[in-house]
Amino acid sequence: MQYHLNGFHPGDPDISPAAANTTRERARLPREVDVVIAGCGPAGLCLAAQLSRIAEISTLIVEPKAGPMERGQADGINVRSMEMFQAFGFAEKIKRESVWINETTFWNPDPADPARIRRVGRVQDVADGLSEMPHILINQARVHDLFLDIMRNSPTRLEPEYDLKVATLSVDHDAADYPVTVTLEHTSPERLGQTESVRARYIVGCDGARSNVRNAIGGALHGDAAHQAWGVMDVLATTDFPDYRMKAIIQSESMGSILVLPREGGYLVRLYVELDKLNEDERVADRGLGIDDVIAKCKRILHPYTIDVKEVVWWSIYEIGHRLTDTFDDVPKALVGKRTPRVMLAGDACHTHSPKAGQGMNVSMGDTFNLGWKLISVLTGRSGPELLQTYSAERWAAAKGLVDFDHRWARVVGTRSEADANDAMPRFQREFINNGEFTAGLTVRYEPSVLTGTDNWQELAAGFPIGMRFHSAPVIRLADAKPMHLGHAIDADNRWRIFAFAPQDDSGQAGGAIDSLCAFLESAPGSPVRKHTRAGEDIDAVIDVRAVFQQGFRDLEHSAMPALLRPAKGIYCLCDYEKVFCADLKSGDDIFAMRGIDRRSGCIVVVRPDQYVAQVLPIDAYSTLAQFFAGFLLPV
């Protein structure tokens, strides 16, 4: 973490100085804003946290509930989301508070007595090498809290406006500015039904499966339902079930299935319990099921083990559905490429699925982590509004993969194969292992586009697949010999990264590959750093250049590095000492070997602000590098 760049400021470094334009009457809504966000779920708050850090962007986030969430709803955080939390700066806090899912166990009927369940398998929950981050479980409300902390401590001091919902909206595509008119309706008892209007440049609907924003642009969720009722409850209970603090998938002979998920704090547990099959035209509410039905069914499935529920913290009964919208924005298919989006959707507003795969909150945050930096780039004049066209294209494909997977997985969990009794490994265990990378959130791959290159030079860094998330690995920071993960140098700060991996025998010396690349980026007229960085800005304000060397840190001198890797920044022109890294030869975790980087040639790896690999290039591909950035960044 870096701070004190522009002078010493005591106190919590996570609290930024307030911007000059943050004060307004809390009782009055602004008349005009850059972005309206509908909904304070994980998607909405992830977006708001990003926008709040930019002083010149005005944001209004509204939520029909009276205040922040306290309990219930989602709880699973996959390793990809943990990598994202690292960029936001609160992964360590989440790791401390949460429960880590280390093993998953599988239970089936005992062939000798099918009325009883027995453990039939267990696997490591996250395979070695997938990520440095764990798979964890924690109350969704705590994730909200941490995003809210970022918002409150940001330069804009952004706070949600509770007791407000988006009722309707309209878009005037001929308007010169603020083309979106949003009608907000008060939901508090004292102002119920009263409305106010706000004009905005953009609106993002994160307002759930019954989204008014989606309805306003004529969108709809398409898909099907499994016609199966499930109950979910967070409980404090006593039990003799052996795997109560493991993630456990239980399939009984005839009573149905249970998914056991230990929760944070060491005592709380979440149980997903299969209830009744529904008729084609029947809804869950028609059955009149309650918490007593969930507990009773849970007891029957767990036989011969017992459970005594002492306190129900939260519970719900739901029907599994798998649905997806046609598009994540308001541009009709006939106008794609001719009109840029003004209304965008994220999270449950555009995709719904069962909670048992633990993907809902993760994919929702992935939506707005993709969208946030793009909105910032457009609103700050770094990119043209056509950049926003990439959002729907990229995230619709990611959501389609989730819905298809969830469709299959929900049926695997809810249906026991007859062969399971004789197979050495039950079907649901095989499926769990085969889908490990998917459930970890690591299979999203963005197709070639203006933001993602082709695989012409992929062999230079085979372990950094283009279009997929940047897979971190251990390194040693040269200036202070700190062991760390290279991916942790990527903050959620809207900047692009160029990681230059040095060829063999390159120590940063004059005339070497790294020195020549840095000279081009620092001084050449065609340099993307020079072309897209404004006068008076730090040289890494838009494109952050870092180098990784093959030698051990004791074999190199930081003072001998090219000037671009020792940039003078801030009002005092202080040196940034955190741009140069070495392979971690002491531990044996050599990033060059781990990620298949060509030792002889080295390479350039370009990483997007949302941690996805955009390009792998030869280290001397200067013009190609410049052309790539010119495809979406405006010249200054």
Image (cartoon, rainbow, N blue to C red):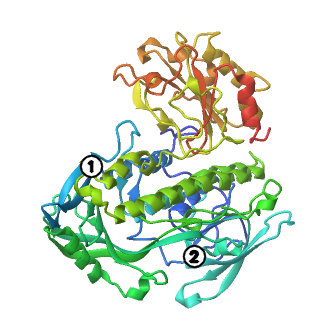
Q: Foreground mark, 1 or 2?
A: 1
**In the rendered image, which quarter is residue 174 located in?**
bottom right
Tell me which amino acid carries mark 1.
Met
Q: Position of residue 357 (x, y in %)?
A: 41, 59
Disc number at residue 210?
Answer: 2
Q: Is residue 206 left or right of residue 180?
A: left
| Rendered-image quadrant of the C terminus | top right
Note whether 160 is above or below 365 in the view shown.
below
Q: Is residue 290 left or right of residue 122?
A: right
Disc number at residue 425?
Answer: 1
Mark 1 Cα shell of 10 Å, populated few (<14), some (14-19), many (≥20): some
Q: Nearer the viewer, residue 545 or 253?
A: 253
Who's the residue at 30% across and 74% down the image?
313
Who's the residue at 23% across and 76% down the image?
311
Note whether 266 is above or below 297 in the view shown.
above
Q: Position of residue 241 (x, y in %)?
A: 16, 63
Q: Position of residue 468 (x, y in %)?
A: 55, 40
Q: Position of residue 149 (x, y in %)?
A: 48, 59
Disc number at residue 46?
Answer: none
First reached walking from the N terminus: tag 1 or tag 2: 2
Who's the residue at 65% across and 72% down the image?
213
Residue 356 appears in view: no
Mark 2 Cα shell of 10 Å, populated few (<14), some (14-19), many (≥20): few
Who's the residue at 57% across and 23% down the image?
460
Q: Is residue 62 left or right of residue 438?
A: right
Note whether 388 is above or below 226 in the view shown.
above
Residue 576 appears in view: yes
Tell me which amino acid carries mark 2.
Arg
SS for tag 2? loop
CA distance separating discs 1 and 2: 40 Å
